Amino acid sequence: MALACIAVPLAAIFVGRSRALMVVARAWSSQMLRVCGIRFRRVGWESLPEAIRSGSQPVVFMCNHESHFDPPVAIGWLDIPAVFIAKRELKWVPFLGQVIWFMRFIFINRQNRAKAIESIAQAARDIRAGKSVVIFPEGTRSPDGRLGEFKKGGFALAQDAGVPIVPMALKGGFQILPRGASRVTPGRYEMRIGEPVDPLAFGSRDELLAEVRGRIEALLDRADA
């Protein structure tokens, strides 16, 4: 992980800052998945509108969170540059904090409501200017593999920015590397991408949250994905 973090600013020299994390995350996750005996596939990207796949339409990707594998896979396998909405405390994690700063992640101060609201307003401006983001609306990894309660901040952000939400499901991470585990179990791991949701079509954040949650649940439950 430390080497991957060091590689991000080096990769920026060749592919640009906006794409550096995506390139390194894909290379790192591909190697780790292969070494750990994990069979990976992505489903649904090709069905997204061309504007999203080309990166000309910024979006908010929302995904469940089961494993430490989720962040590099969620960033590395989108084909377009994206950053995370991250808690402020990650700034001070060695190596990772430097990458987060370099890639201009959007930080949320969860301990201060006023500053959190201010952060969301700034994030909405960044997204309207063209920056796509990835959000884990549960806020943390699932302790039991089940979809946890969603926080509303990401939905407020999407509505304020006026950009589509793309629901995603990462399936298999809990069996491969659950929260608290130190050993990887080989298995199947899938990234399932759903159809975009227009946040402006919903009268309230609760309705929008319920719609996106339902779509992520459906992606997780699909037997044919």
Image: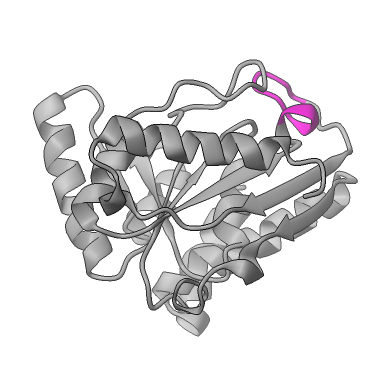
Main structural element of the magenta stretch: helix, strand or loop? loop
> Can see residue 87?
no
Position in image of residue 105 (x %, y %): 34, 53
Question: Relative to 203, is 28 on the left or the right?
Answer: right
Q: How many marks?
A: 0
Q: Quadrant of residue 41?
A: bottom right
> Can see residue 79?
yes
Q: Is residue 181 magenta?
A: yes
Residue at point 42% right, 32% down? Answer: 210
Position in image of residue 184 (x %, y %): 81, 32
Question: Relative to 209, is 169 on the left or the right?
Answer: right
Residue at point 63% right, 62% down? Answer: 77
> Closer to the camera, 70 or 52?
52
Question: Relative to 7, is 122 on the left or the right?
Answer: left
Position in image of residue 79 (x %, y %): 57, 70
> Closer to the camera, 127 or 195?
195
> Closer to the camera, 1 or 70?
70
Question: Relative to 218, is 54 on the left or the right?
Answer: left
Q: Which residues are magenta?
A: 174-182
| Scheme of image coloration | one colour
168 versus 153 height, above or below: below
Residue at point 66% right, 16% down? Answer: 144
Residue at point 51% right, 83% down? Answer: 14
Q: Is residue 79 magenta?
A: no
40 versus 209 height, above or below: below
Quick one: which residue is furthest to the bottom in this view? 14
Position in image of residue 20 (x %, y %): 50, 70
